[in-house]
Image (cartoon, coloured by chain):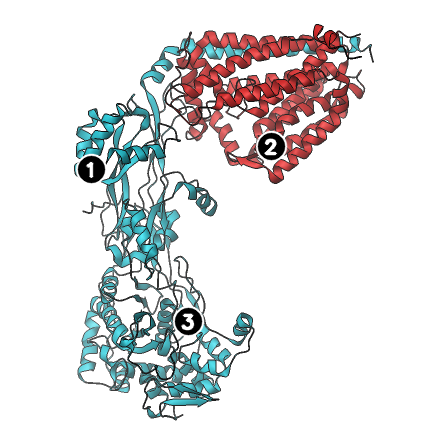
Amino acid sequence: MFGEDDLVRSHQERADIILNVIVISFAILLARLWYLQIYHGKMFFNYSLENRLRKDVVRAPRGMIFSRNNVLLTHNVPRFDAIITPQYLEGDDETIGYLSKILETTPESIVKTLKKYQGQAKYIPVVIKKNISRREVAILETESSKLPGVSVETFISREYTDKDSGAHLLGYISEISQEKIPRYRDRDKYDYKQGDFIGQGGIELQYDLEIRGQDGYQFMEVDARGRARRHVTSDDLYSGIDNKPAEPGKNVRLTIDRDVQLAAYHALDGKDGAAVAVDVESGEIIAMVSRPAYDPSNFSTGLSSNYWGQLVMDEKRPLRDRTIQEHYSPGSTFKPLTAIAALEEGIVDENTKVVCNGGYRMGGRVFHCWKKEGHGVVDVLRALKESCDVYFYSIGNKIDIDVIYKYATLFGMGQRLGIVLPRETKGLIPNRQWKKEQTGVEWQKGETLSCVIGQSFVNVTPLQLTMFYATLANEGKLWRPHVVKEVFSNSGQVLKRVEPELIHQFKIHKRTWDIVHEALFNTANAPGGTAGASKGIGIQMAAKTGTAQVISFSADKIFNKCENQEYKYRNNGLFAAYAPAGSPKIAVSVVIEHGCHGASAGGPVAKAIISAYMNKYYPSYQKKIIAQENAKMSWSQIQEDNRANPVPMVLENDTKDYFDETGKLIRPYTLEKGGQVQTGPLE
Amino acid sequence: MFNFREELKRYDYSFFGICTAIFIIGILNLYSATHSQGIGPEEGLYKTQIVWFILSWIVGIVVSFIQPKNFFRLAYPSYLISVVLLVMVLVVGHSALGGQRWIGFGSLKFQPSEITKIAMVLILSRWYSKASPEQEIGFRELIIPFLITFIPAMMIIVQPDLGTGMLVMLIFFIITFYRKLKWKTITIMAIIAMIGATVVYNFGLREYQKKRITTFIDPEFDAKGSGYNAIQSKIAIGSGQFFGKGFRRSSQGALNYLPENHTDFIFAIFNEEHGFVGSIFLIALYIALFYRLLWLASNVNKIFDSVVVVGILAIFFCHTMINMSMVSGLMPIVGVPLPLMSYGGSNLLTFGICCGIVTSISNARNLF
């Protein structure tokens, strides 16, 4: 194995080249070190000794949310935190003791907070007290020389004009906790950092990426105590440093009318439930309220952990948006659907009569009518007006559940309607296949009888119920419900406009529509109608009440007075309506949990919503309605009158979009010079 | 026959000697970097490092008693093992800082890409000493060595650890250059590499890797990440001036203006505390080590041994040069540790084994 010496020696030339490369490399490196340490040494030394560089995040102002009439619903309010930067903390006991006096806390709790963050780098500030008062801010600022390392940090909290009333719809924002950052990074493919706020629920979540804007950053020179000295821009020393301005978030304009929303909210005072109102001819949601609610402002002002705990523990689940995330048995409000299916399929016609004596026997079982003594002889018009269960049981005996399923689907039930809001639930309309798949048991005939009166498996969200009645009102057009009209930049440029979208349109016999319209008008206006108590003035509502059991009662208990039951066993009260009956514009549904009766619990809410809407948008047309009401016109007389003396329905008071000569939208609210929407502080 | 006294008599202490000297400077520096002001969570790092050092040196000394012909035999198995380990990293490895580079044996964590470097040197040396050693190397002779290198290099790059991956390719190039790679071939390779780099940059790199490169070329592109570190590193080095601020007087590192100040940026802390004088002294030690290695490469009597020594020189030199260049702002920040100075067990072990191998080769040189 010897004798390779010559071969090794022959590589000498290459070895020399490598040696040269090594020597030259180090020569360049030494030249570089000389340049940094000797040539610029003094400058760098001064920088390291006296000045520190700090990179501050410049938070992008969050975009605003407006009502359909451009009322500002959100505010970005500056609030203050007291912070300690451990790196600059001096005379620990003294400083902390003094600070604790100012902040009215104990030195121990401050030390405890500091200990908690001991592991992190010492230049990262630790928040000692969130959301301190303006008085505390003033003291901290004037006493800053006695408090080395203590400073005041501004943060922007998100606060809401109408507090609880839009809680579920608008949502809220909260700070992302450290441990959840990776999860949200995965979800949104967005580089979240500590201290970022994120939309949670409602519009704030759904439009988060648009509303949020883009944070920028700003380099600061700070002195040895961490006090900012000057903003740094790219220069000789800091070549390569460039500040990035924040890009403000985009604004969202809703379809929601603030006045109607507030009317709905207050009509639901003291009740648990939901109300949804929609524009019949576009699917624009006009009001959308869920109660119990919460104040979304609390989530970004620092009180959150306590408040959050309360909300989560509350057995009424105030965080849940009952309008779309909860479903309910529609009870009798479902009956128009059964009537339409039966009329269309020829199971009944307008002359079919059924005798109701308070119960309907099928197999070995008696199905009770809500009216113990019975309704006597009823046809479809009276059955709907007085909500006779026996009439519908007789339909249920003849109709197939899959037929009910087909028609309910046409009206948007049992499916997500695609509203752009988080976590919309599907509700449930059963059919044979579903029952078989879910339970392995075939469909039972008796179940159809419960389903046709909106009980048993049938479940709809308040939004679906509203869209069902809107589709009834417009005779077969199912619109996509939506809450956002447009997204626009601070300069007023519309970036995205949401146009009304037809999910589908279907045709059934004109006569069927007429029967149902007349019946629902009579329910609210004719003597004996179940919704007569909520008739109102100048709204000409067509409506249906519903009362849905939340548990099944034994035969002896079923007629016990609802109010005497334990709260959680009381029936849900439902109310669905559209108005004005002669040419419908708005559809509303109301669900009152454990409200006992649809008419008494839900009726006043629907009346309040429709009144607020009609008073605001159709005050002129109301005169005609009131005239018809005063003349006590029947349904056929009203139709006759509308044909003979047509009065155009002019939409009033809605905000029009004005364009300047260049086609740019002009808005009624003011924009500050920088393009930032001007909002005042809330106190 | 193995005669321990004879062995000790011709034992070459120079490599372990120089490396230990550098390590002692390193450990003092590490102590200083983690103990300057206040108490952080990194307090005990220097102790761990000493434990790793002792362990690595024991392994290195054991290796130094292995006959060089056994390295020749071990070339293929060690290569296979390192490829298997790299596959394991990709399948079951631990993630750290956005990369999957670690593999665990119980509580011991370990970076297989370190062992890969040594295995690469051995297998390339074996290949070059066997396949027509008389010839110069052109494209045809390059195919197999290139494949041998490319497979593990790609596995390291997708971990993703671009720095180490490129390092492996660089070691391959230096070894091949030493084994008389034709100048014509070098010229063509340079052209291909330039085109390849353009393509890889545009299609093959992760976002953060791209950022590091663009930050270097155009620091305004992203001042958040690497640009900030580079500036803080420059301030640290520059502020050391001629004599430095003194032991445990670094302010940049202590205040955490320099991230990872005990690993990648240790050279900046050293410069801040010991100034230009200190760095001349440190660099002199590294040059002594490299010169000694190169001398050894030219004075062994087997071509395999010679190439192995050059390969190990390449490992040491590339690490040292890349680290010092990036810290002083001559190169983008790619996360390569400084041999014997940076905190980290895996790379200490690598350098220990390297010392063992070259010592063994040096010892065998005098044996007839």
| Quadrant location, the N terminus of chain A | top right
Answer yes or no: do the residues labelled 1 and 2 have beta carbons within 8 Å?
A: no
How far across and how far down the image is residue A367, in percent?
41, 86
- The residue indicated by pointer 1 is A104
- The residue indicated by pointer 3 is A459
Pointer 3 chain: A
The structure residue drawn at horizontal position 33% and vertical position 48%, both measured from the top left corner, is A173
Pointer 2 chain: B
Q: Is residue B328 visible?
A: no
Chain coloured cyan in the rendered structure: A
> Considering the numbered disc 1 on the image, is that residue within a helix, a strand or a loop?
loop
> Considering the numbered disc 3 on the image, is that residue within a helix, a strand or a loop?
loop
Is residue A448 placed above or below B192 in the rendered structure? below
- What colour do you see for chain B? red
Is residue A374 placed above or below B58 in the rendered structure? below
Q: CA distance from mark 3 to mark 1?
A: 53 Å
Q: Amino acid at mark 3?
A: Asn
Q: CA distance from mark 3 to mark 2?
A: 55 Å
Label at residue B157: 2
